[in-house]
Every structure is written in C-alpha cells, then in structure tokens.
Amino acid sequence: MLDLDRQEVMFLPGVGPQRAKLLKEELHVSTLRDLLYYFPYKHIDRSRLYAINELSSDMPYVQVRGQILSFETEGEGRKRRLVAHFTDGHGLMDLVWFQGLKYILSHYKLHTDYIVFGRPTAFNGRINISHPDLDPVESLKLSSMGMQPYYNTTEKMKRAGLNSRAIEHFTSTLFLRLQERIPETLPDYLIGQLDLMSLDDALRQAHYPKNASLFRQAQFRLKFEELFYVQLNILRYTRDRIRKYHGYVFTRVGAFFHEFYSDYLPFPLTNAQKRVIREIRNDMGSGRQMNRLLQGDVGSGKTLVALMSMLIALDNGFQACIMAPTEILAEQHLATFRNFLGDMSVRVELLTGSVKGKSREAVLRGVQDGSVQILVGTHAVLEDTVVFQHLGMVVIDEQHRFGVAQRARLWTKNNHPPHVLVMTATPIPRTLAMTLYGDLDVSVIDELPPGRKPIVTTHQFDNRRELLYQAMRKQIELGRQVYVVYPLIKESEKMDIKNLEDGYEQLCKVFPEYKISKVHGKMKPIEKDAEMQRFASGETKILVATTVIEVGVNVPNASVMVIENAERFGLAQLHQLRGRVGRGADQSYCILVTKYELSRDTRRRMQIMTESNDGFEIAEEDLKLRGPGDLEGTQQSGIAFDLKLANLAKDGQILQLARDTAMQVLDHDPDGVLPENKILWAQFYRLKKQNINWSAIS
Ligand code: ADP
Ligand code: MG
C-alpha cells in the first residue's frame, strides 16, 4: 500500500526533483495525499466528438477528430500567425497559433489523425480555433476520458511545463497505482447515518467523475468532511474552555446601571436592545465566562449596549475595557461614553498609540490601581505595560476580525478570564459567523431605534454632476448638511488626496455661499478635530472627507451622503458609510457616484445598495459576490479562506449539517475515547498537526 502521507509526489513518473520543488512552492503539494486533495476547478466533457459542420461560435468547447491538410503563415511582425487547415473528411476549419509557431510546425504532421480540442469562433464564415489542444489519436483513450479535469497552475509552473495537463497526468497515474482503497477518514456509522460516499470513491469522482450525479455526491462528502473537522475543532475548543474556565459571577445589577438607566439614558431602549442586555446579564451571572457575539446593523445602537454591559461589571467591583480597531473610533467611543455618562462618577480614560508621556503614565497607573473604571483603547491595551487591577469585562468593537487566538490573548491579562463581548461593525453572513465566530454565542439586534426612515439610495454617473449638485443644494437649503466621501487607499494615497483636494475646490466654486470643511488622515489631529467640530456645530454645510468618517462620526443633521468613486468600495464599507446618515428624523439620501464604465460585479454592487437598506441582506450578497477569501478580515483569522472545496457563500446547508454532526459527536464522546470514533479522532489530530491555519482557532 502506498503511504499517502509519507510518499512524496517527486517519485511519481514524470515529476522528479525540479517539478516537485515547484509543486511544493507554488501549490503546497508535496505528498501524495496533498496531490489527491488538489482538486480541479472545472471539468470539461470529452466524451463526445463533433463534426466540423455542426460547430458554431456559441459552443464553449468542442473536440473534433481529423487531419491537417496544410500549414500557412499569415501576416507580418507581431501579427504573424500560423494557420493549419483542418478537415474531418466532411467540413473544413482553421487552427490558429500566434505563438510557438516553430514548435508547432516541427511537431505536428500533415495527414495524420489528431484530436483537436478548443473553443470555436467564427471568422469570415469559417470556424477556427486558436491555440487548440492537439493530441495524436492513439495517445487519448477517448471512450474512457469522460470528464476531463482542469487544474489551476501558476505562471511559473506553466513556464516549466507544469500545466493542467501535466497535473492531470500525475493524478491519473496516481489513481492507477492505488491498488487498495484509500483509507476512510470518517467513522462507518457517520457514513451510514448521512449516506455519504466513501472517501476512496469521493476522491476518484472528484477528479474523474463518471457522471454529474456521482460528482455531486463526491463534492458533498468532501465538503461535509472539510467543514465537519473545522466545526469539531471550534466546538471542542469551546467546550474545553467552558470546562476549564469559570467566569466571574456578576450577581448584582446595581447603582451604576440603575442610576444610568433611570437618570441618564436619553431615550428608551429598543426591545431588541433590552433583550440583548438581558442575554448578556444572564451570561454574566451564570458562572461561566461569557463569549458573545453582538450582531446588529449600522445604527442599531450597539455602543449603548456595550456601555450598559460594562456598567454591570462596574457594579460588581470590576473594571471594563473596550477595544476599537482605529484611534479615531476609540476617541469617538470615549466621547460617546463621557457624553452618555454625563456627571456620573465613572472614570473613563483613553489609551491609544497617541497617548504619550505623562498622560500615558497617569492612565496606566489608574488602570493598575483600579481608579480607571472603563478603559477605551486600540490594540495598545494589549501591551504588557497595561496591567488591570481587576478586569471583569472586555468589549471588542471589530472592524477587522480577530482570530480566536488573538481574542484569547485578552484573557491572559488576568488569571481569570473576563467576560468578552465581540461587536461587529456591520452584520456578517451566518455561515461566516459560524466559522469565524463559531465559538461564540450570538445576540442579534434586529431592530433600529424608532423614527428612522429608510435611506433613499441612488446611483449616478460622474458625468452628470449638475444633478448631484442640484440634489445637494436642495437639502442644504432645507437646513441639512452633506458628507462627500472619497476613498483612501494606502497604495494610491497621493492620488486619492489629490482627488479629494480637486473635489473640494470644485465644491467651493459650485457652492460659494456655503462654508465647506475638509478632513483627511494626513491632517494634524487638532486641525481634524477643529474641522469636525465646525461641521458638527452646523457652521460648515458640507464635509469633504476620506473614509476617516466611516467610523464613529455622528451628526444627526447631516442627511446626505455622497460617495465618490463608489466603485472602489466594497459592499460592507458602502453600507457602513451610508449608516452615517439617517440618524435624525429627516429623510436621508445616499448618492453613489461612479464612472460610467463598470464591471458586472460593480454594477451588481450598486444595484444591491440602491435596493436594500438591510445590512444582513447586504452581507449575504457580499459573500456571494466576492467569496469568503476576499471578505475583509477573513485573512487575519486564517480559516474561512483556507477551505479547499466548501464555499461559505453556497454551502450553508452542508455547514449546518457539519456543525450539528460535530455537536452530536461531542455530546456522545466528549473525551474522545469511544472506539467507534477512533478513525475520527486520529484524523482530527492529524489535521490539527498539519494545518497551520488551525492554530488561529485553537
Ligand atoms: P451602531 O450599532 O452602528 O454602533 P450606535 O451605537 O452608534 O450604532 O447608535 C447609533 C445612534 O443611535 C447613536 O446616535 C445612538 O445614540 C442612537 N441610539 C442608540 N440606541 C437608541 C435608542 N434606543 N433610541 C434612539 N436612539 C438610539
Ligand atoms: Mg458602532
């Protein structure tokens, strides 16, 4: 029996040390098992031969059997091409090459049977195929070929002759050599219970499917298994944590909470806020450590929930800490909290990279002696110099997503883990939450504060500026204020700032009668604050800004959000930006301005934005459009994007099944000792050892 995990691909015929090195570097394929799990990205049906007379240019791929009648070179210089006139005995077509002419001429013979494979196009009434695959008939066993796998390879690999065909050769050779069945990696009873295909069949069918139905079954089995072991890891970790750590028991809801609730709360809580605060209170009193994810749309009032939860910690003699992804957001939280708390005797302090010298020392001292009751900060609060006297509760306000391991670092600040509340900036799709935050309990604020009118969103091309200015002027005349936001990306910062400056000047010309503010990241904090202040007070009517305003800013009188170069923003970010307006009682507007030429995805993004105000819905669409690997934050957490087959945008049902099954296994076999699960735990530990990315969640 071949040892799939020990044997290296190098020893497969046709690989050798050079190519083995490339496979490893470019695809992380070094063992035979790695190769088996390097799946094709598509298949093409090669079981059928076409006659030239039935070809048309709307067919995706075709193959034809026939002979080359003659070669001809046409054109000059860079337009030079080689044309082979090809016949199947009935019709005629042309095969065309623009590169590698010499090789083709010396390699392929006239009047010899070949199988041609490629994408047909029509030119001057004749079908031609450029750069076709051309194989001698005897080298292809067409009847047995069926679906041909196509594998991704990199440019570097292609230059060394390692194309899809080469990989196909390796996998087909490997399957031929595997005399015995590939050992199972799931226990029999699960395979029976879920009616799964065996691993051996699944791997073979995933590469070389006999038909579409077997291919689907293979995909199902492999995706299930992939998601199952990830969920098993997350859930086992969670159960361990619950077993190991006991949470502080907050028995009291006392003076701070009650005083705030009855005397300082400026508006009644929404029912959703009340429910979530109840859930949090229950966790805190349960004796187990709270690990809760708080999901809510932009503007649903998560900050207030965070503050009131922290007050419960204070009521029980503990300190609380809230961690924001950026300094601006941390400063904004500080201001919001101080504002909410008014003259209540709660000491709230800020700790970011910009808090330096004497004031930093004072904050650190206060944190250590317990006089700072609420610490608001950035990553800076994780530094070793920050020592709490008695930290009971941590809120993580996330824009970027932390992995479980990073979250766990917070607890090491105590010998006892504090309660943890994670808040997302915008909703994230359920499947992503189950994977990224699968170890957390979930609370959802599914209700906006009363009186909010849905924001009216429109999409305009930037060659119709008069319309835009008209809309802006109309609102300003009604007494409202307007944001104009420009993208800012580090790599193109200079251009971006220039765009903003140009836009600012243009607006000054169009609106000479109004004062206009300008804010961007390159300004000094004092100037920035002053400008923000002028806008907040209503002195300036328009605020031109980069995305610094994405987070935090809260000016209820601002009712128009103009987003310039909207095509450069992702959906989550657009939704977050739009959430800056619609906070007062007035009808609010969001105008997405883009260039005229847009990709299909971008048009779709604009359409979703104009049709929906629902962050949960938008998040699902975002996942569908972009795939989990591209979603913000998945990289850091290093898990969702590493799935080989499963797709969190499409495989929600399989994911749920995998999670339920993992729970069932843990319920029956919490200590991992049952004989029927022997295969399962062996596979689990093997994966854990191998998969570096799992370290992020364990
Ligand atoms: P997000 O969930 O996006 O963080 P915020 O916490 O910033 O939302 O709240 C958005 C705005 O709604 C803030 O101005 C906040 O003061 C206000 N707000 C929060 N809860 C309520 C409520 N129950 N009734 C009215 N306004 C509220
Ligand atoms: Mg917020």
Image (cartoon, rainbow, N blue to C red):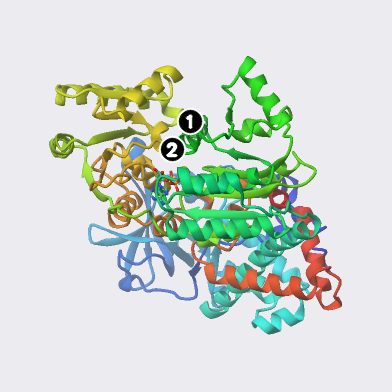
Q: Residue 542 shows which numbered tag?
A: none
| Residue 605: image location, x then y, percent | 34, 51
Give 160 or 198, whichever is nearer the viewer. 198
| Residue 512: image location, x then y, percent | 15, 21
The answer to which image quadrant residue 64 occupies is bottom left
Q: Which of marks 2 and 1 is nearer the N terminus?
A: 1
Residue 328 falls left or right of residue 159: left
At a point 47% along the width and 32% down the height, the residue shown is 335
Amino acid tagged 1: Ile
Distance from Cα at disc 2 to Cα at disc 1: 8 Å
Label 2 CA crowd tier, 10 Å (few <14, some 14–19, many 20+): many
Compared with 363, 291 (above or below) is below
The answer to which image quadrant residue 209 occupies is bottom right
Count of picture labels: 2
Amino acid tagged 2: Val
SS at mark 1? helix
Residue 348 falls left or right of residue 683: left
Q: Is mark 1 within 8 Å of ligand 2?
A: no
Q: Is mark 2 within 8 Å of ligand 2?
A: yes
Compared with 590, 500 (above or below) is above
Label 1 CA crowd tier, 10 Å (few <14, some 14–19, many 20+): many
Which residue in the structure is indicated by mark 1? 328
At a point 34% along the width and 29% down the height, the residue shown is 545
| Marks 2 and 1 close (CB-CB < 8 Å) | yes
At a point 67% along the width and 74% down the height, the residue shown is 661
SS at mark 2? loop
Which residue in the structure is indicated by mark 2? 551
Give 409 or 29, whichever is nearer the viewer. 409
| Residue 574: image location, x then y, percent | 37, 45
Residue 295 falls left or right of residue 171: left
